[in-house]
Image: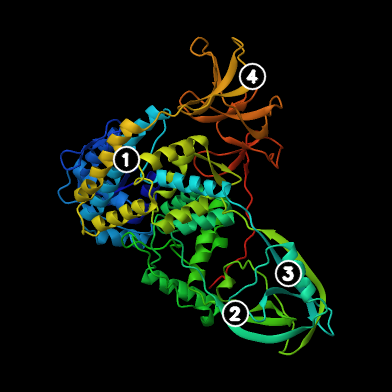
Amino acid sequence: MATKLVIVESPSKAKTIEKFLGPDFKVLPSVGHVIDLPAKGLGVDTRRNFTPKYVVIPGKEKVLLELRRASRQASEVYLAADPDREGEAISAHLARALELSNPRRAIFNEITKNAVQEAIHHPRVIDDRLVDAQQARRILDRLVGYKISPLLWRRVQKHTSAGRVQSVAVRLIVDREVAIRGFIPEEYWTLVADLSKVKEKKLFSAELIRRVDAGAKDKLRIGSEAQMQVILDDIAGAEYRVTAVERKKTKSMPSLPYITSSLQQDSSSRLRFSPKKTMKIAQELYEGIDLGGGRTGLITYMRTDSTRVSDEAQKAVRGYISNGYGSKYIGPGPKGKQRANVQGAHEAIRPTDVLRLPQSLHGVLTADQLKLYSLVWRRFVASFMAPAVFDSTRVTIQAGSYLFAATGSTLSFEGYYAVWPREEKDALLPDLETGELLRLHKLNPQQHFTEPPPRYSEASLVKELEELGIGRPSTYVPIISTIQGRKYVKLENRRFVPLELGETVDRLMKKHFPEIVDVQFTAGVETELDHVEDGERGWAELLSSFYGDFKRALSLAEKEMERVERPIVEIGEPCPECGQPLVIKQGRFGEFVSCSNYPECKYSRQMQTKIGVACPRCGNDLVERRTKRGRIFYGCGTYPACDYALWDRPVPEPCPHCGGLVTRASRGKPILRCTECGQEVAELQPTREPAAVG
């Protein structure tokens, strides 16, 4: 009997799936795309309806040969790439390259036995509309990048680039920095009264809100110390009397289950993971972890913009909540509206088995895997729990012709806080009644100044891009990596700061390609791509409507874009070979130090970035360096006097076992390991244990 072939994207995914299907199936990975536009050349015939010229990706010939051989020996071929546009395109390219007469598309949002077997038993045909949408995006990005980037090379410097989405991301960061630079702080004052009941010593605080004769929404603004002094004089010696007490029940609703962007945002703020790290770990949890009885996927597909949850998963989580906490803890579940432009029939990011509690995975997952799994698990369970209920009180207090307000709340029913950490504490007020006289202990006038808008963090940039409708779940991490790799921006105290090169390129893009960096235009393109996916518009029609204006703008920019002369920055050292000043220059892999007398003197060296760790051999600073091919490594800053070097990044903390140098693995599992004794160094963070059922 001929073997049935299943083709997936990654080797680890293949290992997980193969054990679910039995001996009649063979599972092979394509290792991502095998067919793409050529690395060199435009690869698109703009005169023939934007026909793409696809080629086999260099290095993938052997993979394709193995897949072709296996497909010819198979009775059936299932294409099980990821359930999104990219996965659909990979499947379509494989179907053509392997000359499959009857390709079967297998779709699953989670890598579990039931989901995989269901997908194999109920395959569908390749969705040409999804493929068209991916192809339109790919060609759009190629046209923008391939046409504008060479112009920037000639006018600014080599290895600069533009991108349909990356240029908008840079614009957001630059515009925010411009707003910060131009911000003028405004002074304002607040007044807080420390009060108590007449016969009690326990204090509570009330803040000045408005004059008695002002409207309820007309909050008093105090702009100077002089204005504050007038108010203090007005209420000197005044009685403080309760004029209104409002008591009511308030609710705090749980958040929706995670989508890609919200997972990246929460992971950044709660776990301090970068979006790149978050997606790497999420991919590991999705593709499968060996739990002792074989590999299984622990979470659903992690590149999604849908908050939908399958009926089976809803039933399971409600059963868990009922058994573990009681029926009163069951809530209505996610009721949020699906955002516009949500791709396909995706689900939210959730655990594949809600009964697989985080504490059951101690010692199985790495510390970082466990943190992320716990975050996903808690958010999912919380989203189906009842809202938290508070007893809230608002008290209005009159002093002379001014009103103060005090608020308090106490948690009366924890609801979803049973599994989701509560950050705010109860604010307690004494039992007060209307007309009650209070004792003033102290008035606290305080000066403040308005603050500029904050710089974007990785998480807030992702949130902004998502809210503006720019990019897709699969693009957030590449965008952030690209704009940093091009030296357009840098992270400083976990916030993005535009670099000189980034501001220069942004200025040129705004001047010569205003449509490309226009936020509304870029978001509109995303909507048009969704129309292609829905079959409402042809992919070539979309490209044609874009290319006419773009071609004219490009032609004009070729004539009018000025050449940017970047200032020469001396580092304050003489060249050791000729004595001329050393300067900073830009190369393919970033900045380097060169002799200003080049080409007569060819002395150069790498820029050395200290990493805050001492060389274990000689005690001098370790620095970040690059090989001739651009790969990062870490070595002693005194080289060649000391040639100590290693690939993995050292961390400041010594090994707790032997005191040796500890490095963070740059490949495979994200672990810390001692270079001396070889022991793994990883500590789990204590977490509140969810309820065990059974």
Q: Which residue is mark 1?
A: 144
One can see residue 294 in this view = no
Name which residue type carries label 4: Glu
Q: Which mark is residue 573?
A: 4
- How many angstroms separate mark 2 from mark 4 (CA)? 67 Å
Q: Which residue is mark 3?
A: 191
Q: For mark 4, give the secondary structure.
A: strand
Work out whether 637 lies above or below 346: above
- How many angstroms separate mark 3 from mark 2 (CA)? 19 Å
How far from the left and from the top, in percent, is residue 226?
75, 64
Q: Which residue is mark 2?
A: 215
Name which residue type carries label 1: Val
Residue depth check, mark 3 versus mark 2: number of the one nearer the observer: 2
Nearest to N terminus: mark 2 or mark 4? 2
Is 297 on the left or on the right of 139, as rendered?
right
Residue nearer the viewer, 107 or 364: 107
Nearest to N terminus: mark 3 or mark 2? 3
Residue depth check, mark 4 versus mark 3: number of the one nearer the observer: 3
Work out whether 677 lies above or below 618: below
Q: Determine the residue positioned at 45% across, 78% down.
A: 332
- How many angstroms separate mark 3 from mark 1 (CA)? 55 Å
- How many angstroms separate mark 1 from mark 2 (CA)? 54 Å
